[in-house]
Amino acid sequence: MNAEVITIGTELLLGEIVDTNSVHIARQLRTIGLDLHYMTTVGDNLERIAQVISIALDRVDVVITTGGLGPTVDDVTREAVAQATGRQLVLDSGLLSQIEAFFSRLGRQMKENNRRQAYIPEGAIPIPNPVGSAPAFIVETEKGVVISLPGVPREMKYLLESAVLPYLRDHFHLQAIIKSKVLRTVAVGESNIDALIGDLMELSNPTVGLAAHPGQTDIRITAKALTESEADRLIGDVEREIRRRLGDAIYGEDKQTVEDVAASLLKRVGWSVSFAGVGPDSHFVSRLQQAGISVTVVDVSPSQPLDSEQNILAWARQVRSASDTDVGVAIGSVQKGREEYTLVGVVSPVGEKWARLSYWAIPEYRKRWVANIAMDLIRRLVLERQANVVS
């Protein structure tokens, strides 16, 4: 079984609001094991809405629309669903009574245009909306099912969870769940990870996919199973193999950030940190401080040109010595003619590490990239310290 979500509203296409409904629906469909194959956005146009619904019915079993169920002239989802499914719109007296009762509770008189919201495609299953004025409905066809929900997020979420998910579970006899886990890596490029685990990305269940970000790559493992424990087992088998191949390139999982992990390790060993930098703001200090680590910023200039491993590490030693901290971090951006690169040096009680990054990127990406690398070097030094203690 598979599904498509269609979000309706010209304001979405204009970028005036962000579509959060699709994300919420996608996450909820995972809980009943319904695969979401497509997400479509269309403006408030009757013909185009009907067209995308017709296309969706040709390729999925379940079509879920959000938006366009209000009382105004441009709310045409009801008409579009009727057109796409070859039906007439009919007045549902039960829904009309529910809408009238809703306004009565608010102490307001229902306007005539709200009456439009009680019209649904002939033969549709009505879904009353106790938290708003826009009822939902379900149209069952030979091709598949069309479910129309309000676009107001609060109303959409309530009706999805109270009515739509139970309907889908019962109607299609859905018994599975879909569960995902994300492993987060840093300082290893997407192509390198692909070379190491590419064969695992050809699995059908669980599936493995990559998502690249500045300075890090996420690995998503997704399993479909009848029970959560079975999904966990499927994910666990693949996760162990990925961890075996990638080792400490994996810094965390799911919601963890590299700064959170680095800060946690620094607190565990009680190390203090100092920093000096030349060039664009690296984000290093602010992100580590937000994670709970106080960073001493020192005004120490490099004694030698930043053109080698030795010189960036020498500067990091200066920083550490000047501040009397456990860890000294130095970051310098250098441009020589058309060559541009950034050097990162980290010195600690157990060793030293450095990195050179040569790339062209927009400044915001560059800042995040460099900060990720610096915090990863700290993480690796702490891990080495812990390994030495254990041995």
Image (cartoon, grey):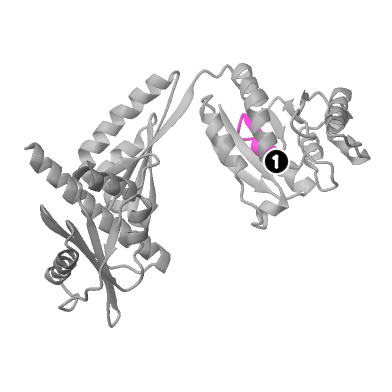
Q: Horizontal and vertical percent for residue 15?
A: 64, 57
- Magenta segment, which residues? 56-65
Quarter of image, res 351: bottom left
Q: Is residue 327 above or below residue 74?
A: below
Front residue of this view, candidates 359 and 87: 359
Which residue sits at x=59%, y=41%? 22
Which image quadrant: the C terminus? top left
Under mark 1, the amino acid is: Val
Please indicate whether residue 56 sits to the left or right of residue 368 in the image. right
Which image quadrant: the N terminus? top right
Q: Horizontal and vertical percent for residue 200?
A: 31, 36
Secondary element under disc 1, as helix, strand or loop, is loop
Q: Label 1: few (<14), some or many (≥20) within 10 Å?
A: some
Q: Is residue 305 magenta?
A: no
Which residue sits at x=29%, y=38%? 199
Instruction: Give the residue pinned by disc 1.
Output: 152
Q: Is residue 70 above or below residue 361?
A: above
Front residue of this view, candidates 180 and 253: 253
Quarter of image, res 14: bottom right
Q: Is residue 86 above or below residue 307?
A: above
Please indicate whether residue 317 sits to the left or right of residue 129 in the image. left
Q: Horizontal and vertical percent for residue 47?
A: 78, 46
